[in-house]
Image (cartoon, helix red, strand yellow):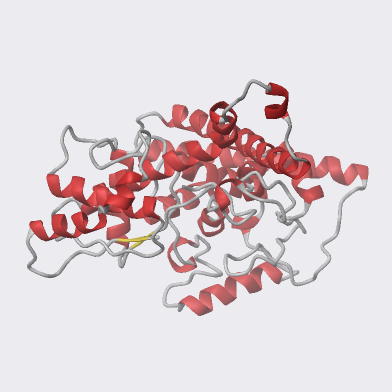
Amino acid sequence: ILFSFSSTLNARIQQSAFIAMEFQSPEASSKRNDNYPTGSTVPFPYETPYPQQVDLMDALLCSLKSGRKVFLLESPTGTGKSISLACSAMAWLRHEEQVDLTQVEKQKETSPRSSTSWLDDWVAPDERERQHQVTAVQQRAKLARNALNKVLVGIQTKIGTGNRERRENLVRSAVTAAKMRERGRCKKVRRRKITKKPQDEDCCIADYKSDSEKCCNGWDSSDEESVSANNSGVSHLLDGACLDGSSTNHGQSALGGVVPGSGVRKIIYAARTHSQLSQFVGELSRSVKDVRVVALGSRKVLCGNKGEVNRPGRSEQVINDACLDLQKSKSSACPLLSSKEGLATLALHGLAQPSDIEDTAALGEASCSCAYYASRSSIAAAE
């Protein structure tokens, strides 16, 4: 978890270099390999970063390599903290992902072999089973991530270098088409009489505070039958159990040691104001290619149902209660939550290009879908 604070002290730039050098212990440096990123090898949007930026990136990368759970980095205002954190953190993330996906292959290539090769080929049953599970997790994660990247590349190609209006028009047409396809599938299901009724009267779309709630149509990401049934749409592309390779059995191991079902490894960037988050998203979009970002906000800033839920003057708690009550109501429903595939399509368009909270809210308004729940369905796939 990275926290960026603007320094209010009249500190000298040299202080940041001093703190960075303290983290570069010989032990941490000796653990590096040729492929591990450093402050001087991290991809940077400018030809030459400032020395204090190189020191800051080295401090972050060395601390991550040494396995420190918590560490504090300080750098004065105007020294390029945001871009340094963005570039170095993403370089570390991409390196770790590459290691996760090639771990078994490298072990096989580097394992020593003796003259009695048949002894080298023999593996204990427990170790063989473990290797098989690791390989299966890797393959599942590769397939899911390749499928997600293929869809995102297609969206990026359509958006091109267009302006915000072009992006909103594209997401509007894509969400509308997704809703129509979902309605068509629902009609076919009704004709075959295989629809399922919700088991709980008070069911609503799973809020980010509770993983145990079910959504309105009775679908749950941990339900194997429901996941396979939804593969005809795009919502399965955002399933965390597929992206981390744990499949639908959350008891299995996941790629990278993440919590099974949580998706890809993530960097969480927290800031005090929306403007600071917007600045960081801007630095990411200029500095890192093809990064999947989701900006999380409350219903107060993301909910587009201004008439029934997000009325002016309402507090956060009142808005939250109104949203959940509307989902549980039998007489009315939120029009922005009418389609699961529409939400997933909006989430994919949000991931295709780095978006801040204002961009996310604008895409939700343009597509007549809920930006709040779409952003939360993006969490598993977001980096």
Q: Quadrant of the N terminus?
A: bottom left
Q: Is residue 369 visible?
A: no
Q: Quadrant of residue 66?
A: bottom left
x and y percentages locating residue 92 in the rendered image: 38, 44
x and y percentages locating residue 161 in the rendered image: 35, 30
x and y percentages locating residue 95 in the rendered image: 42, 39
Tally of numbered tags: 0
- Between 226 and 307, the one nearer to me in the picture: 226
Q: Is residue 86 left or right of residue 11?
A: right
Q: Is residue 254 left or right of residue 359?
A: right
20 relative to 151, above or below: below
Residue at left offset 35%, top offset 42%: 32
Q: Is residue 254 visible?
A: yes
181 relative to 24, above or below: above
Judged from this view, the residue extending furthest toward the right is 193
Residue at left offset 60%, top offset 25%: 113
x and y percentages locating residue 293 in the rendered image: 43, 47
- Between 218 and 110, the one nearer to me in the picture: 110
Q: Is residue 6 left or right of residue 203?
A: left
- Between 57 and 346, the one nearer to me in the picture: 57
Judged from this view, the residue extending furthest toward the front is 115
- Between 173 and 250, the one nearer to me in the picture: 250
